[in-house]
Image (cartoon, rainbow, N blue to C red):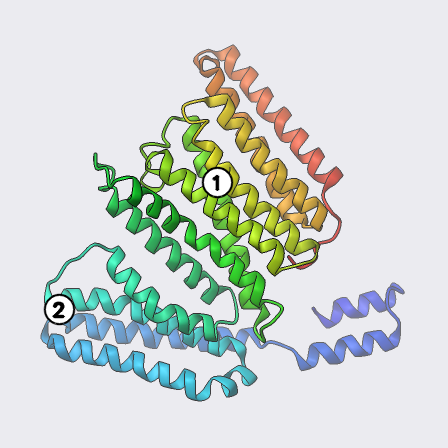
């Protein structure tokens, strides 16, 4: 916030002189030298790029064991720095700890690729991903403080689960892993959404609430995205051909696991915000399970999609999440437009049809904007 803006507020009578002085003092104490940070960032980037260029130019001349040793030593050094100096670094700058943890996890992930290159080995991608997640997820969970590490945890879980499911179903080829494996695959795909439970439980019990809040939000977003994907695939008769929902058994299992996680979420996080988050997770799980019955049925699958996002909009309205409510309205409007073209594809084959489709799109957009402005919450409390 600029000092000029604070002065304008005082001149307009919005704040008194005492409030103005307190705001100016607070901003002075918490000022961020963005220009200086930018200079430091550019310098660090230049040094990093130069180092990468030197290593890349001499890559073949460096023995593989030396490269692996340096790579491993760098990871070990960052781990030692984190565990020995974490409290001091966090007290000085929480983002320093966040950056170190994220960089360490990233170096750990690239180490497996480096290892395969040196020894000319190959394996299904889910195996090194699973090993990396088992080794570095605890580090991220113990030291994470913001969205980068939360994204690494949830994103790593999602990537591993998807790669495992894709491999087990033969990368889209005709391969039946069996009913028991389909149940396990559905459970594996649902597990990243279960991280919302950990986030909801820990955010009020940890000294790092921002990290756990982001973890909960990302896991919830994954559950909603998965449910939306299931409804979209069911509308186009693609549910059975997707590796994530191979057969109705995997999809139904995935949905029920997420729904049970949502029900458990009611207990771990009381309050309006927590209850609405639990409602959305439960609804997403039920939508995935019900998509199995709506497969190859355009209108029922679309109605299921509308019910899912209408429920999200209602929960957002109850919890006063303005951004989530507006997103839900926009998604419903977009799906309504897509559905109209699915049901009347011949509209695009004539000029008159194009005019009608254009008017329809404008009408739906106008209604969505009006609904969003009329009913969207005025405030955006913490989710």
For this view, does 256 lie left or right of residue 317? Answer: left
Q: Residue 370, percent across and down?
A: 71, 34
Structural crowding at the residue carrying mark 2, measured as other residues with C-alpha within 10 Å and reported as few (<14), some (14–19) or many (≥20): some
Q: Nearer the viewer, residue 362 or 172?
A: 172
Dot 1: element: helix
Q: Residue at x 15, y 72 (%)?
A: 59
The answer to whether residue 329 shows anywhere in this view is no
Quadrant of the rendered structure where residue 202 is? Answer: bottom right
Q: Residue furthest front?
A: 180
Q: Residue at x 61, y 51 (%)?
A: 277
The residue to which callout 2 is attached is 118
Quadrant of the rendered structure where residue 172 is? Answer: top left
Q: Residue 279, percent across and down?
A: 61, 46
- In the image, is residue 159 above or below residue 312? below
For this view, does 365 lie left or right of residue 290? Answer: right
Tally of marks: 2
For the N terminus, the quadrant is bottom right
What is the number of the mark on residue 227?
A: 1
Q: Residue at x 68, y 82 (%)?
A: 29
């Amino acid at each position: 916030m600029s000092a000029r803006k604070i002065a304008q507020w005082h001149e307009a009578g919005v704040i008194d002189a005492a409030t103005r002085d307190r705001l100016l003092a607070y901003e002075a104490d918490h000022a961020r030298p963005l220009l200086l940070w930018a200079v430091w960032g550019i310098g660090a980037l230049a040094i990093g790029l130069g180092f990468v260029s030197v290593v890349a130019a001499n890559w073949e001349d460096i023995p593989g064991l030396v490269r692996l040793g340096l790579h491993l030593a760098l990871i070990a050094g960052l781990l030692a720095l984190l565990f020995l100096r974490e409290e001091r670094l966090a007290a000085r700058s929480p983002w320093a700890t966040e950056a170190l943890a994220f960089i360490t996890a990233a170096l750990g992930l690239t180490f497996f690729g480096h290892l395969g290159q040196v020894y000319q080995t190959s394996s299904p991608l889910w195996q090194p991903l699973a090993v990396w997640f088992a080794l570095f997820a605890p580090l991220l969970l113990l030291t994470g403080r913001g969205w980068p590490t939360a994204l690494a945890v949830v994103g790593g879980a999602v990537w591993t689960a998807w790669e495992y499911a894709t491999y087990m179903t033969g990368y889209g080829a005709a391969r039946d892993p069996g009913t028991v494996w389909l149940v396990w695959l559905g459970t594996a795909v649902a597990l990243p959404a279960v991280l919302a439970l950990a986030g909801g439980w820990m955010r009020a019990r940890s000294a790092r609430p921002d990290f756990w809040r982001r973890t909960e939000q990302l896991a919830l977003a994954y559950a909603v995205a998965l449910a939306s994907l299931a409804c979209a695939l069911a509308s186009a008769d693609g549910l059975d051909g997707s590796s994530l929902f191979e057969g109705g058994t995997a999809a139904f299992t995935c949905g029920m696991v997420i729904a049970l996680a949502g029900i458990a979420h009611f207990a771990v996080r009381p309050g309006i915000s927590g209850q609405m988050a639990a409602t959305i997770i439960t609804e997403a799980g039920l939508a995935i399970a019900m998509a199995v019955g709506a497969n190859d049925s355009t209108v029922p699958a679309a109605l299921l999609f509308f019910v899912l996002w209408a429920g999200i909009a209602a929960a957002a309205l109850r919890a006063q999440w303005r951004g989530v409510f507006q997103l839900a309205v926009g998604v419903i409007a977009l799906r309504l437009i897509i559905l109209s073209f699915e049901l009347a594809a011949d509209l695009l084959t004539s000029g008159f049809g194009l005019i009608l489709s254009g008017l329809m799109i404008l009408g739906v957009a106008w209604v969505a904007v009006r609904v969003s402005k009329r009913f969207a919450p005025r405030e955006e409390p913490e989710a």
